[in-house]
Image (cartoon, rainbow, N blue to C red):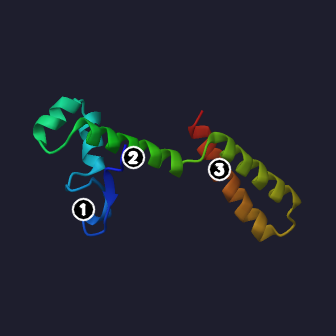
Amino acid sequence: MENLIECNPKIMLGKPVIKGTRITVELILEKLAAGESVEDILSQHSHLTKEKVSSAVQFALQTLRRDFPPRSENRKLLDALNDAYANDTDEDEKGFLRLMKTKQSEILDEWK
């Protein structure tokens, strides 16, 4: 499937849109989340196709996968922070590492 999504700072402030339109991926996702069917969306926007709507959903999925590392990567990061904290003697650095450990633990807790 060819890439049907573009991000151009001159179109919709750079938000991802369906190429050749000003219809944002965000709008399509909002409509789907609100319970509208693909057919509803297509009837409201005659220049869209099922393939374009599908591309918007796939783009969002790929973006989420790219922006959120897997749980195992977050666990590795927390383990590394714990090791660094245990071996550090500088109190300022320990304070920073303590904060980072807390934030990383919160991320992992949200995924439980």
Tell me, for residue 104, which label it has, or none.
3
Query: Within the image, what quadrant is residue 99 found in?
Result: bottom right
Residue sitting at 61 percent across and 45 percent down?
106
Helix, strand or loop at mark 1 = helix
Image-based side of 20 in relation to 59, left or right: left
The residues bearing labels 1 and 2 have C-alpha atoms spaced at a distance of 17 Å
Q: Earlier in the sequence, mark 3 or mark 2?
A: 2
Residue extending farthest to the front is 2
Tags 1 and 2 in contact by the CB under 8 Å rule? no
Q: Quadrant of the N terminus?
A: top left
Query: Within the image, what quadrant is residue 96 found in?
Result: bottom right
Vertical side of 38 occupied by 26: above or below? below
Q: Which residue has dot 2 on it?
A: 59
Helix, strand or loop at mark 3 = helix
How crowded pointer 3 is (Cα within 10 Å; few <14, some 14-19, many 20+) is rated as some
The residues bearing labels 3 and 2 have C-alpha atoms spaced at a distance of 27 Å
Give coordinates of residue 54: x percent, y percent: 32, 38
- The mark lying in front, picked from 1 and 2, is 2
Helix, strand or loop at mark 2 = helix
Residue sitting at 73 percent across and 63 percent down?
95
Q: Which residue has dot 1 on it?
A: 12
- The mark lying in front, picked from 3 and 1, is 1
Give coordinates of residue 12: x percent, y percent: 24, 62
Q: Look at label 2 and name its amino acid.
A: Phe
